[in-house]
Image (cartoon, rainbow, N blue to C red):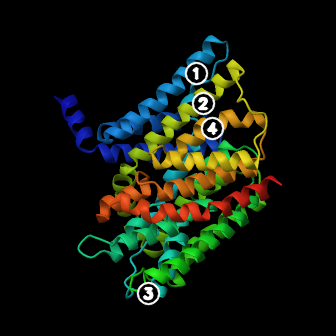
Amino acid sequence: MQTSNILTWLRTHRATVAGSCLLAMLISFLLSQITPISTLPSTLFAWLAFIFFWPALPRINKQQSLALMSVGLIGAAVAHFRGDNIPLSTLLGNYLSLISMLTAVSFLKMMASGNQESLPRGKKGIVSTLAASHLLGAVLNLSILVIMGDRLARQGKITLRQGTLIGRGFTFAALWSPFFVAMNVSLLASPGMTFIHILPVGLTIALIALVASTWRMNRQWQDIEGYPLDLKTLLLPVGLAIIVITCHEFFPQVSVTLVITLVAPITALLFLGLRQPSSVPQKLEQHVSQSLGRMGGEVALFLAAGVLSSGLMVMVKALDYSLPIHHFGALQACILLVVMILLAWTGIHAMISVAVSSPLLLPMHPNPDMLGFMYLSAWALGSGSSPLSGMNLMLGLRFQIPAKGLWRNQAPFVMAILPVLWAALFYLDY
C-alpha cells in the first residue's frame, strides 16, 4: 500500500520530481568541475529527469528522441564490432555541459520583473521592441518571449506583426550571446573556436539585421504597439555579459559554458537574497516545479542529440569514413548553411544538423571560428524562421499566432540577410 502511495505521488508530482533531478544534476555537475568527483552522478540525474519527463512529452518529441538515440546507438554498436569502444559515460553524457548550462540560465528568469510603462507606438515601439527582445533575450532566452508577449497581449492575443517583431529581435542574439545554447553547442562542435573572435562579428551582423528590420518595418507598420524599454532594464544583460567576458579573459582555461553555468544561478540567488530574502525559498521551489519541471523537450533533445553525436563520431573513426571532399572552407560553409536553414524549415532542428555534420567535417580541419559561426548562423536563421522552431511554436501556441504566418514574415528577411552572413564566413576563413 505504501509503495502504491509513493507511485501515485510521483505521478502527480512528476514535474516537480523532474525539476528536482535537474537541480541535482546542476549541483553535481558543478562539483565535478571543481572537485575530483566524476560526472557519473550528474549524468544519472539527467537521465532520471528524462525518465520522469517522458510520459508528458509530445508524441513528436518522443519520436524524434528515439530516432536520434537509435542512430547513435547503432553507430556505437558498429564501432564496437570494429574494435572501437566508447565509454558509456561519454555516450550518455556527451552534452551534459549544455543541459547544465541551460538549467543554470533558467534561474535568470527569477530576476525578471514586469514592466508597467505605457506601450510606445510606431517607430519608437519598433525600436524598443527589437532592442528589448534582442538584449533581454540574449540573457533570459525563450522566457523573454512570454514576458514581452504577456505585456503586449490583448485578451491573450498579440498580433502577427508584434510576434514577428519579438521573434526578429530575439533570434539574432544567437549570433553572439554566450547565454544562448547555440553558442555553447558551437563551441563544443567546433573545437578551437574562440568566443572573443566571434563576438564582434556576431554583434556587427546582429546590429545590421536590427537596423535593416527597423527601416523596413517602419515603412510598413507605423501603427504598431511595441514593448517599453528603459536603461534600468538593460542593467541585467549588460552586467552579466561584462561578468562573463571578464571571467573568460582572466581565466581563459575555463570554458564560457562553465563560466555561465556558475555565474547565472549565483547571480539570480544573490539578487533575490538582497532584494527579497524571505521570498528565496518560495521562488526557488516555484522555479524547480514550474520552470525546470517544464524543460522536458529541451532535455530530451539534448540527451538524444548527445547520443547521436557520440555514436556517429566513434563510428566514423572506426570505419575510417570521410566525405568525398577534402577541404571545407567558406564556400562549402555557405552552401551547407543554406541546406541547414532549409532543413530547419522542414522541422529538423539545428541541433540535429550540428550533431550529424560535426563528426564528418572535423577530420578536414576547417577553420574553427568559421565552422562555429556557420553553426550559429544556421541556428539563428533556421530557428528564427522555421514554423516548427521552439520560438515560433511558443509564440504561436501561447498568443494564438499562425506559425505559417510567422514563417511568411521571417523567411524573406532571412534570404535578404544571408549574403551578409556569407561575407562573414569568408572573413573568418581568411
Q: CA distance from mark 2 to mark 1?
A: 8 Å
Closer to the camera in the image, 267 or 349? 349
> Residue beneath label 4, please?
357
Q: Secondary structure at mark 1?
A: helix
Whether the residues at callouts 3 and 4 have beta carbons within 8 Å, the answer is no
Q: Which mark is residue 310?
A: 2
- Assess disc 2: are there few (<14), some (14-19) or many (≥20) residues with their C-alpha within 10 Å of its C-alpha: many
Q: Please tell me which of labels 3 and 4 falls first in the chain.
A: 3
> Residue beneath label 1, please?
76
Q: CA distance from mark 2 to mark 3?
A: 49 Å
Q: CA distance from mark 3 to mark 4?
A: 43 Å
Whether the residues at callouts 2 and 1 have beta carbons within 8 Å, the answer is yes
Query: What is the quadrant of residue 246 in the picture?
Result: bottom right
Q: Residue at x 27, y 45 (%)?
A: 13
Residue 369 in the image: x percent, y percent?
75, 52
Whether the residues at callouts 1 and 3 have beta carbons within 8 Å, the answer is no
> Residue beneath label 3, please?
122
Name the residue type under label 4.
Ser
Query: What is the quadrant of residue 376 in the picture?
Result: bottom right
Closer to the camera in the image, 268 or 322? 322
